[in-house]
Image: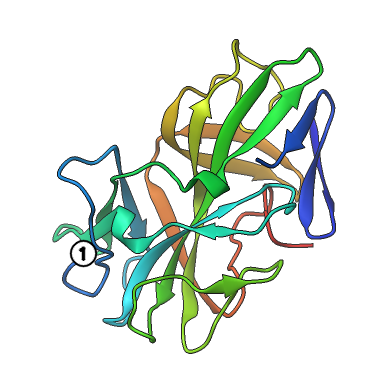
Amino acid sequence: MVLKRRGGGLILIGAYALCAGACGNGLESGKSGSQALFTFGAAFSPGESLPPTARVGVIWTDLLQRQPDVPMPPSWFSSSLGADPPQGFLINFYRTPPPAALFRIYTSDGDSIEMAFGEIVIFDDAGGDGALHIDGPRAEMALPDSYLAGSIDAIIYVARPFSSGRDGFPLGPALSAGYSTLFFGCHGTQVAEEIRQNVGVQFVLQPSADLPEIRTCMRTHSP
């Protein structure tokens, strides 16, 4: 399985085809529910600081850029800074992704996976409404908001997994239903040599108007 890029998106080469279908420092995104569906830890580099208007955001994206990006509504998840270390915090998801974020990937033998793929970011909510306002193939942020940091990792949600494991699938052979975070160990600009599930998410500060893509492989919005 090889990943290639066309028109700012990714193309899956092989037997797969895609079908669209804080508190404290301001990292508070609201919450909607008494029990989280999925919780994971996140951190940014020691010694770095964020403005009080910093928020966590999630952009659900079609891997081939065939349908618009879908921001996660801010009331559907929450984030809060921890006291030790001060750069660490937790992110809680209370709902599944919006239906418009889901897509299907089919295999040559008719099997398929239905899923969503999310880019996790920190942004400056200068407008004060807590929501991501983005547009275009680079997920450009609408003024006065801007990106502050991108993530090495991604988050996925599997609504329906493959009926059996799929060696060579670029997101890993054994994705199960529900939420996971994925770490991609990149070799060059195309191939992920290592994929690990449910590890802590690492943010890298990179202020930008466009989506800051920290990974050198599995990029979703770069040419």
Q: Can residue 15 be seen in this view?
A: yes
Q: In the image, what residue occupies the spot 73% across and 25% down?
A: 106
Q: Can residue 48 be seen in this view?
A: no
Of 196 and 158, the residue lying toward us:
158
Q: In the image, what residue occupies the spot 42% across and 63% down?
A: 57
Secondary element at tag 1: loop
Query: Residue 124: which quarter of the image?
Result: bottom left
> Residue 134 at x, y = what percent?
56, 72
Q: In the image, what residue occupies the spot 77% across and 48% down?
A: 10
Left or right: 85 with respect to 1? Answer: left
Of 77 and 188, the residue lying toward us:
77
Q: Give the total of numbered labels.
A: 1
Q: Residue furthest bottom?
A: 144
- Identify the residue under disc 1: 86
Q: From the image, which quarter does the N terminus lie in?
A: top right
Left or right: 99 with respect to 215? Answer: left
> Residue 80 at x, y = what percent?
21, 60
Of 61 and 181, the residue lying toward us:
61
Q: From the image, which quarter does the C terminus lie in?
A: bottom right
Query: Residue 180: which quarter of the image?
Result: top left
> Residue 167 at x, y = what percent?
68, 17
Q: How crowded is mark 1: few (under 14 residues within 10 Å), some or many (20 or more)?
A: some
Q: In the image, what residue occupies the spot 68% across and 47% down?
A: 63
Q: What sort of colour scheme is used for the picture?
A: rainbow
Left or right: 80 with respect to 111? Answer: left
Q: In this view, does 20 lie above or below 221?
A: above
Left or right: 198 with respect to 68? Answer: left
Look at label 1 and name its amino acid.
Pro
> Residue 150 at x, y = what percent?
51, 64
